[in-house]
Amino acid sequence: MIAYRIMMKKINLFTALLCALVIVTTPSFSQEAKDSIKTYPGGEAHSVKTYPHDFTGDRPKNVILFIGDGMGVAQVYAGLTANKGNLFLENFKHIGFTKTYSANRYITDSAAAATAIATGQKTDNGVIGMDPDQQSVKNITESASKRGIAAGIVATSSITHATPGAFVAHQRNRSQEEEIALDFLASGIDVFIGGGVDFFTKREDGRDLINEFTRQGYAVKQDLEEIRSFEGSKLLGLTAPRANGRLSDRGDMLPISTETAINVLKQNEKGFFLMVEGSFIDSGGHANNTIQIVEEVLDLDRAIGKALDFAAKDGQTLIVVASDHETGGMTINGGSFESGMVKGEFTTGGHTGVMTPIFAYGPGASEFGGIMENTDIHAKIYKLLFGEK
Ligand code: MG
Ligand code: ZN
């Protein structure tokens, strides 16, 4: 009996030691995994071009607005370092900063920030295209359509997600993606390309919005090659059931979609407004993942390159590259222009309140210098594109 007790004590001691060992070693394993994604080891760089600054007049006929979701100065510089010291973005000579706070929070979410940029109205976090009293506010694509100016939306997230959603829809909460899809149907916008097929077809109300878009004269494409070669005037491109995957999975979805959207919209003689979102710089920030941040910033930069190709030839197109907020509280603790290595560090898994950079190229670009409210982005684009306040 005594021998049994001693044996049990030994087993218990052994078990306790084993448990302690597991507790001590498990976090250090995941810590290692966490640390490893904070460093981008270096990789392929895309070559960038320098474009002329010969523009016609001081007001643009077309405006292309890029939004890097979660893109602060550190994210931009991580991309620049990873691309061995250069980005297409360096063609932008007019640079400013944006105050990103929302109507009810010092730190905004993407819905309130995109509503501010799209409508000129600050609102509460989570709200899409409405003021804090839940009244719909007119957005820039509605103002464009009213004047016969074409409009388009491109995103890597679902097309009904907060950022693209705020440029088209009016809903109390960003989670109402099925309702946002219905607002898209009513909008008459010329081009939508993003993920989110499920919000159009697997709906609680049982409607098949793809059929309804088709009946309204849209070509509906789910294949990226068909989107690339599209030549009509109304396009709904849905490239994933919900969000598009990481870059390795979705390939050149964003640059290809940007090019297609420009080709569709430029057919309009009165001009166009296009919003293109690099949606997942934010996801990289939330995950404290420098590798994903770099992938996404470089993808957005390649899409910006497509817009510059068009704008430099056209001479009447203003390109603005903005951000809704910073994500991750990122800084850079080391890097190499030779290898492209970037060592990131983070202060949070959420958004931060810092100002975000804004860059402009083309007629009217000088409007975007200095420190501005996020709502000023709407006011400036509105004034430049429509020639009125
Ligand atoms: Mg977004
Ligand atoms: Zn976020």
Image (cartoon, rainbow, N blue to C red):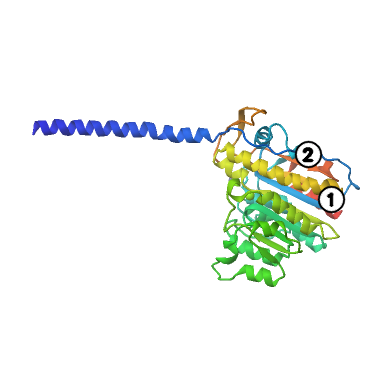
Q: Position of residue 64 (x, y in %)?
A: 77, 50
Q: Is residue 218 visible?
A: yes
Q: Is residue 116 visible?
A: no
Q: Quadrant of residue 164?
A: bottom right
Q: Position of residue 282 (x, y in %)?
A: 61, 44
Name the residue beneath numbered marker 2: 49
The residue type indicated by label 1 comes to Leu
Name the residue beneath numbered marker 1: 384
Q: Secondary structure at mark 1?
A: helix
The residue type indicated by label 2 comes to Lys
Image quarter of the N terminus: top left
Q: Secondary structure at mark 2?
A: loop
Q: Position of residue 192 (x, y in %)?
A: 69, 59
Q: Residue at point 65% right, 71% down?
A: 212
Q: Residue furthest left?
A: 1
Q: Residue furthest right?
A: 57
Between residues 290 and 63, which one lies in front from this camera angle?
Answer: 290
For the residues bearing labels 2 and 1, Cβ distance under 8 angstroms: no
Q: Residues within 10 Å of mark 2 (few under 14, many from 20)?
A: some
For residue 232, above or below residue 295: below
Q: Position of residue 225 (x, y in %)?
A: 67, 57
Q: Residue at point 47% right, 32% down?
A: 32
In primary-sequence order, the first of circles 2 and 1 is 2
Whole-angstrom CA distance, mark 2 to mark 1, is: 27 Å
Taking the image as shown, residue 274 lies to the left or right of residue 366, namely: left
